[in-house]
Image (spheres, grey):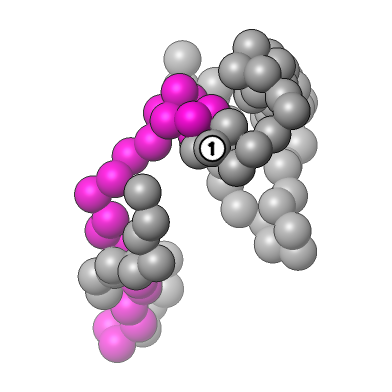
Amino acid sequence: MVNNVLSYALFENHLTSDPNDYMAVTTNAICLDSNALVELMLSRGSTLTETDILAVLKMEREVICEQAAMGNNKRYGNYRQPHTATTRCLIR
């Protein structure tokens, strides 16, 4: 699966009072679950096993949920972005 195109749509930004302010929202139809992510990782020739990767993903989610419950954020690279696992933790 190779998809080098990021489709998006512009929506009115309700976070500002500027009526001409819009935000881009991705509209790609693909939604990957943990198993699909693992398959993509393994297809790159890793020495890790499926069990290893699933264990790390599970532990990452647990730690992110724990930290979110304490009011902390997860940072990816140089940007602070919400993590879907954090959102799921907070609403369950």
In which quarter of the view is residue 54 placed?
A: top right
- Residue 13 shows up from this direction: no
**Could you say where residue 59 lies in the image, as x and y percent from the top left?**
71, 17
**Could you say where residue 87 lies in the image, as x and y percent from the top left?**
50, 32
Badge 1 amino acid: Ser
In which quarter of the view is residue 5 placed?
A: bottom left
Who is closer to the viewer here, 33 or 77? Answer: 33
Query: What are the residue bounds of the magenta stretch?
Result: 19-39
33 part of magenta stretch = yes
- Residue at image mark 1: 43
Name the residue rendered at 76%, 37% in the picture. 72
Q: Residues within 10 Å of mark 1 (few under 14, many from 20)?
A: few
35 part of magenta stretch = yes
Q: Is residue 10 above or below residue 21?
A: above
Who is closer to the viewer here, 38 or 72? Answer: 38
As drawn, is 32 to the left or to the right of 72?
left
**Could you say where residue 43 lies in the image, as x and y percent from the top left?**
54, 37
Name the residue rendered at 39%, 36% in the picture. 32
**Could you say where residue 47 lies in the image, as x and y percent from the top left?**
74, 28
